[in-house]
Image (spheres, rainbow, N blue to C red):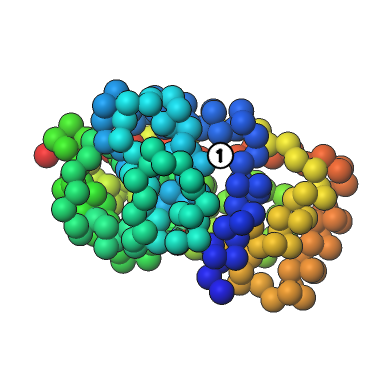
Amino acid sequence: MDHYTNLASHYDEYYRYSDDYINYFTNKIVEDLPIKNYETIVEVGSGTGIFAKEVLNKVPSIQMICVDNSYMMLTRNKDKRIKQVCRDAVEFSKESHVYDRVYMKEFIHHIQKEDRLQLFKGLHQQLTSNGSILILLEPRRLNYPLFEEALSRFERKQPSRVEIISYLQLAGFTTSFNIISYPIILSKTKYIEMVRNRYMSVLETFTDEELENGIESIHGSQKNEELEFLEIFYSIKGIKSY
Ligand SMILES: C[S@@+](CC[C@H](N)C(=O)[O-])C[C@H]1O[C@@H](n2cnc3c(N)ncnc32)[C@H](O)[C@@H]1O
């Protein structure tokens, strides 16, 4: 079964670390894009809408459109203020839509390298003349308390910020770059449950036995019951410049 079909019912429990965490990153999205009253905003790869709902709470006059190719993830979002589009992002970017801002968080690694430029070109075309895009991208080397082979596999698949910035420029955006971070604290018991339930897509690439070995090594390397790590995002902004 597809990763997000499996994960949908647990997604908010695992990824909504705290209200303050959501508030912190939503403020960054609203300020950095920036989102203004009455604009139309698209989140690509929106999942269950954790951030889209909070963006709307902060700027209620906007029209929010959530695009995701997982029906199961979208159906977890019951917010009637949001227009939901169940579509592959690259397909969406070829259609005729018009909006002011677009953002994506923890998403772009799901798009094949050879399709990323086409996606950015399509989004660029759909944006209004003063439009902007914001991409929140995890660094290749995560500092999560995961086991080494999972960290290495994530690293090999994750696009670099340099690649994303150069594709945005090729698509016609003027770019700028920032780093944002938030300290996460959670119990080891909870984190092990998340790993066992393959909360990250990279964990789908391990057999049950390999996963249990990985969990053993987390027990070995994490001595405290309370885990603390920094969630870091590269925040890459593009302004439509022609
Ligand atoms: C890690 S989740 C991020 C969800 C949300 N942005 C957040 O931060 O909570 C990635 C999302 O991208 C969606 N996704 C993956 N590939 C996609 C594609 N080709 N087109 C549209 N959505 C896609 C998945 O269904 C999933 O909901």
Residue 95 at x, y percent in the picture: 19, 57
66 displayed left or right of 94: right
Reading the image, the residue beneath label 1 is 232
* Res 57 → quadrant: top left
Residue 104 at x, y percent in the picture: 40, 45
Residue placed furthest toward the front: 80
Q: In which quarter of the image is the C terminus?
A: top left
Vertical comparison of 71 with 64: above or below: below
Between 146 and 65, the residue placed more toward the observer is 65
Q: Give the secondary structure at mark 1.
A: strand
Residue 213 at x, y percent in the picture: 80, 69
Residue shown at the point (53%, 70%) measured from the top left: 2
Vertical comparison of 137 with 200: above or below: above
Q: Which amino acid does label 1 sit on?
A: Ile
Between 80 and 122, the residue placed more toward the observer is 80
Q: Can residue 78 be seen in this view?
A: yes
Residue shown at the point (86%, 43%) measured from the top left: 225
32 displayed left or right of 166: right
* Res 127 → quadrant: top left
Between 221 and 190, the residue placed more toward the observer is 190
